[in-house]
Each structure stands twice: as structure tokens, then as C-alpha cells.
Image (tube, rainbow, N blue to C red):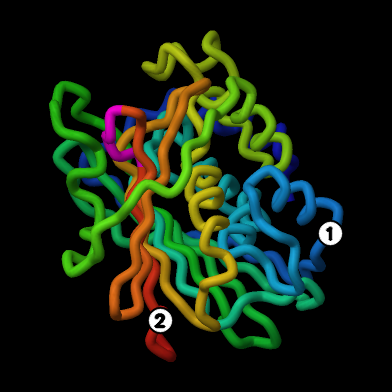
Amino acid sequence: MTSTLGLYGRAVGSMLRRTPADAGLPDATQHRSGVVIDSDHLAAYAHLCGYTVTNTLPPTYPQVLAFPLTMSVLTGPDFPFPAMGMVHVAEEITVHRAPAVDDVLDFSVHPENLRPHRRGRQFDMVTKVMVDGVEIWQGRSTYLSREDTSATTSPADDSPELPQDTPETTLNAQWRLPGDLGRRYGSVSGDRNPIHLYPLTARPFGFSRPIAHGMWTLAATLATVQNRLDASYRVRARFARPVRLPSTVRLATGRGSAPRHRLVLTDTRDRAHLTVDIETAAKGTA
């Protein structure tokens, strides 16, 4: 597999691409088999995101393990969009059963479902985790390739809809996020996209300050309900606006009768950064 540094070199080169309007997604799948969990890496990730280390993996951790595969797809020569500058607008995670720390995991990553968005085009990157040929975890990351930067709507406007019959939420926590959070998460996750690192590296992409990784905000939010998750469940998350670093964010939570957890991460003016619904997953769904 290409090194992470090499992948970022390819990502920078992909910024020179000029994508034809009718370009489609490649038929590209990346695989990695026989993955064994590194306990030190898992502990570092759990500590940074607020999880308690148990005998099962945090729901967002497989996405970190699959990151090199995702980058390999995004930086492939036939991928139509530049890897740098894409916006992560939504995430769906389906846990059929939580991967155990002593499982030997097989991964696959592929893109699908290219579709229009009012600010460009979006697609899904699907990650699957299998044990002994049985799928136990799936992640579906929705990315937007921005082509119309004059639109005034949020990139989240066209992302998958969250369930409407959800409970009211009440303020649960307030976090002060440090300016180096993006660098710290990047060192653990391998995602060292320049928009997360320093003001100087974020400015060419339209940000006056670095922004937090969307997957860190999702992980930290889910960590607050770690001990209340079912044996199988689905997470549906929508990223509304970036979290600039440093900043203060607030977490509001609620629970319905489905059962369903609703979690909302906002700024101090109650503008949503991230909205998450967690519900029991039907058996056999993906």
C-alpha cells in the first residue's frame, strides 16, 4: 500500500484535475485483509476522542483503520474529483455487531452513488468490515465536490435527511477545543489534511483558522453515549458547519421512544455543527 505521505503527495497533485461534467466514478475497490488491532493505537485514539477502552471497538474506529484505503481510492488516477477541498457532509454507520479487539478484520472501500448537489456533485464512499466473510460493520461517508462556490446554502442542505420524529434535547456538556486538536487527531488518524493543521495551511481552502475533523466531532459526540448503545444500531450524522479551532462547542442530547438518541453539537450561539441520530438497526440491513 502507498505510504500516507505518498498519498498526500498524490492528493495535492489531484488538485490540478479538470473534471468533465459527465465524468463518472471509477469501478475501484481497495481491500485490506488480516488487520489486527494495535492496542496502543486504539488506546491513543480512545483517549483523544473520549471513549473508554473496552473489549469492543468504538463505532468510529474502523473508519480510521480504513483511511489509507479511502485515500487510495480518492487519489487514484481515474478518480474524477480532487481529494483536497472535498467536504464531508454526512456519515452513516451501521453496526451489525461491534468488532472485538481480538477480531481479525477484512476491509473493503469503494465509491458509489454519484449524484448532483446544488453546489456541485456528491458521492458515497462505502467501507465494509468483515470477519470470516461476514459483514459486521459498514460506514457510508458522503462527500461533496464543490463546483458552485457562489451558492448561499450550506453544503449540508442536500445531505441525507435525518428522522423527523426525534426527541427534544437538553444541554449536556460544553467543551473548549484547543487550537492544536486537528494536529493531534491527524497524528492518530493519519488524516493530515492541511485544513485541519494551521491557519496558514487552512487559508488556501477558504478557512481563516484550522477546522476540526468531522470524524473527531462525531467520535467525541458518540463517546458520550458509549455505554448506552445497543448490540446492533445505526448512526446517521449530518455535518452542518465546520468547527473552527480553537472554539467552544456545546452538546445537547435527548432520547425518544424508538429508542432513538438525538445528539446535537452547536456553537455558543446554538448554530448546529453536527446532528446525530442513533437507532436500533434492523437485522440484515446495510
- Between label 1 and label 2, give the one nearer the viewer: 2
Residue span colored magenta:
269-273
Q: Residues within 10 Å of mark 1 (few under 14, many from 20)?
A: few
Q: CA distance from mark 1 to mark 2?
A: 28 Å
* Rendered residue at 72%/47% (across/down): 47
Q: Residue at x 77, y 72 (%)?
A: 101
Question: Residue 147, position in %: x, y?
Answer: 24, 31
Looking at the image, is 102 positioned above or below residue 208? below
Query: Looking at numbered disc 2 in the image, what kind of residue is underneath it?
Result: Ala
First of labels 1, 2 by sequence position: 1
Asked which secondary structure carries label 1, the reply is loop
Relative to 258, is 42 on the left or the right?
Answer: right
Res 143 seen here:
no
In the rendered image, which quarter is residue 183 located in? top right
Q: Which residue is mark 1?
A: 38
Q: Looking at the magenta stretch, what is its main secondary structure?
A: loop
Q: Say the numbered circle drawn on residue 281.
A: 2
Q: Is residue 25 magenta?
A: no
Q: Position of residue 229 (x, y in %)?
A: 52, 73
Camera-side residue: 229 or 190?
A: 229
